[in-house]
Image (tube, grey):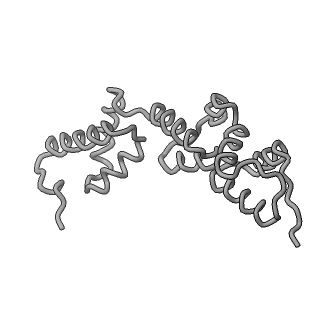
Amino acid sequence: MKTKTSSLSTASERRAHIEAVCLRLLARREHSRRELLDKLALRGFERGECEPVIDELGEQNWQNDDRFTECYVRQRIASGYGPIRIGYELQQRGIESVDLDAHAEEHGGWLNLALDVYLAKYGDEKSLPQSEWAKRSRFLLQRGFSGETIKRLFAELKIKPCRSG
């Protein structure tokens, strides 16, 4: 199947098409530079012809990695994800260094966020069988909270695993 991009004959037509695709994508939500490059590659454009267009969009403030990061982190924290997962997802999107702790402090810190996620899912039961305690720990780990945060959460809630049997 031929892509639509191969029918564009001149460089200026291709550039205009790349810009139009980028603007359509950016109109829906913020995108990182890498996300735009990846989506354009899927549409058959080469990286070398896309980079100058994205640079220009960045100069015009249509595309901004800092703004993308701010929106993305805010949304993921609101969805109940922890720093490890958010950091990994940002890295996959081409964002390398972010102070996630500063964002979490706006919500009371990672412990309070983990507490909200935990209580929303499980409630306030104090004595748990070892298997249930491990299951709940895995849930929080998959959400991206550190082992130390989970340990502090269980201490804060005075939750202890008990032996079943």
Q: Residue at x 76, y 63 (%)?
A: 132
Residue 16 pos. (x, y %): 18, 40
89, above or below 60, in the image: below
Q: Residue at x 64, y 56 (%)?
A: 142
Residue 91 in the figure: left or right of residue 157: left
From the viewer's side, name the closer residue of 130 and 124: 124
Residue 3 pos. (x, y %): 19, 60
Residue 86 in the figure: left or right of residue 60: right
Q: Residue at x 39, y 37 (%)?
A: 30
Q: In which quadrant is the N terminus drawn?
A: bottom left
Residue 151 in the figure: left or right of residue 26: right
Residue 115 in the figure: left or right of residue 91: right
Q: Quadrant of residue 15?
A: top left
Q: In which quadrant is the C terminus drawn?
A: bottom right
Residue 120 pos. (x, y %): 64, 46
From the viewer's side, name the closer residue of 129 and 108: 129
